[in-house]
Image (cartoon, rainbow, N blue to C red):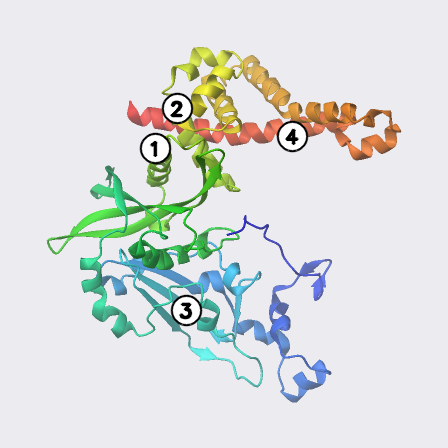
Amino acid sequence: MEPPAEVYDESDGENSVDGHEEESVYLFDLVKPVSKEATVWNALNMNPYGLSAWATDSVEAMKLKLVRCVKDMDDSELNFKPEMTYQVFGQKEIIAGYKDLQVNLVYGAGSLRTLLDIKFSKKIDADVLEAENVEEKLNGFIPKDYFTSIDNFSMGLDKEEKEFTPPGEKIREFAIETESGEQTFEIYNAAPYKDHKMRSYCERMQTFIMWYIEAASFVELDDEKWNFFLLFEKYKFDNSTRYAFVGFVSAYEFYCYPDNIRPRISQMLILPPFQKAGLGVELLSSTHDFYRGISKVTDIAVESPSHEFQRLRDFVDCLACQKLPEFAPSKLKDNFSKEMEAVAKGKLKMGKKQAQRVYNILKLHSCNREREEDLEEYMDYLKKQADKQNQRTHERAKKKGLMKMEREILVEMIPSLNPEYRISSVTQAATSMFEQFVKVVSRLERDADEDD
């Protein structure tokens, strides 16, 4: 599995006005190539702009659903949408050739038994435009053993859900209070390389990532270094205990000299029906606790975190550091210390960079943000933090003798040598950090209010 790639758009501005592409010409890329286009459209007595009626937004067309019994099949309130489809249907997220297209992916809540149900009112004439083969596009991105017959899917659903139990070893059980009452959840640890049941389940489970994680790719199940943490809701149905899949964390356990491991969290997902309930905090905290209990773990890293995941990570790590006397509010008035770095590494398996970040957030948390003087003092502190990279760059340049070069060439190589640029970039970086940190602080304050 490779690091996430940046999302890009391949449009070169053709068929556009003032550089902005018009929606009405989306399908030009899909029309069969002809030498004299206008003549062909006239012969067919068609307006090419009318083809937009055959273009479907793939995000809107797709619906996912977790069903706990056959009765749930007809409950439209259980539907939820993907956040993205470009990894399957292309950058424009358009499916060509259908009217009233619906692409329904239905999963057994626990077993993830899968149904692909494609519906449409009309399909375009193949002589005009070759409609996209939706099922062919989805092959390789949905479980291999999917059903296309609603009857066949429904026939074995109740039995499979009743018999399903999570793969791996249970590492935690907890309950939360909701509007509908208390809900119980369990977290399991499993490695697909060692556990055949987990391997089969992983092939179904990880298909969700294409709809919710940018630049996602499936993990290599033959690699023994992959480890998973699965979250399930445990519930009662027809006098039996059943499970509903909620989400997962995947981690790759890198070798670290001489005989240690450095786990790196690769992917994390909580499915939309279970979001906004604090379950991401519980799952990530449990993942951290698991690795903190292993003496050979040096520190816990994260692969290319999104802004949302980084904010969750910051919150979880702040909660952990708040319990340490070295991060007490009275200690936060001083600078980040070697003692803080050591205790964060030793007790929480937290790297220096993340420990410094957590310190910065907790320092803001302890600051009186309503006092202008305190806030200005904190912003000055952040600016000094942001400027450290410039200082290191300048020191390296001095050691290499680059400062003897002509000023114009040197500033072009090292823009931060320009005072105006340096002040602007440092201010911008400090402001960005503050905006990120204040969101975490707000959540810490809400969490504290709820505990009171």
Residue 100 appears in view? no
Q: Earlier in the sequence, mark 2 or mark 4?
A: 2
Q: Is residue 378 left or right of residue 34?
A: left
- Measured as percent of width and height from the top left, residue 170 is found at 25, 43
Q: Secondary structure at mark 3?
A: strand
The amino acid on which the numbered mark 3 sits, given as a three-letter code, is Gln
Q: CA distance from mark 3 to mark 2?
A: 51 Å
The amino acid on which the numbered mark 4 sits, given as a three-letter code, is Gln
The amino acid on which the numbered mark 1 sits, given as a three-letter code, is Asp
Q: Which mark is residue 428?
A: 4
Q: Nearer the viewer, residue 189 or 22?
A: 189
Q: CA distance from mark 4 to mark 3?
A: 45 Å
- Measured as percent of width and height from the top left, residue 49 is found at 62, 74
Residue under label 2: 347
Q: Earlier in the sequence, mark 1 or mark 2?
A: 1
Up the image or down, 443 lies above or below 280; here it is above
- Measured as percent of width and height from the top left, residue 86 is found at 53, 60
Q: Secondary structure at mark 1?
A: helix
Q: Which mark is residue 102?
A: 3
Residue at 82%, 28% in the rendered image: 402
Q: Secondary structure at mark 2?
A: helix
Figure label count: 4
- Measured as percent of width and height from the top left, residue 118 is found at 39, 72
Q: CA distance from mark 1 to mark 3?
A: 42 Å
Up the image or down, 110 lies above or below 383; here it is below
Q: Nearer the viewer, residue 66 or 288?
A: 288
Q: CA distance from mark 2 to mark 4?
A: 34 Å
Q: Earlier in the sequence, mark 1 or mark 3?
A: 3
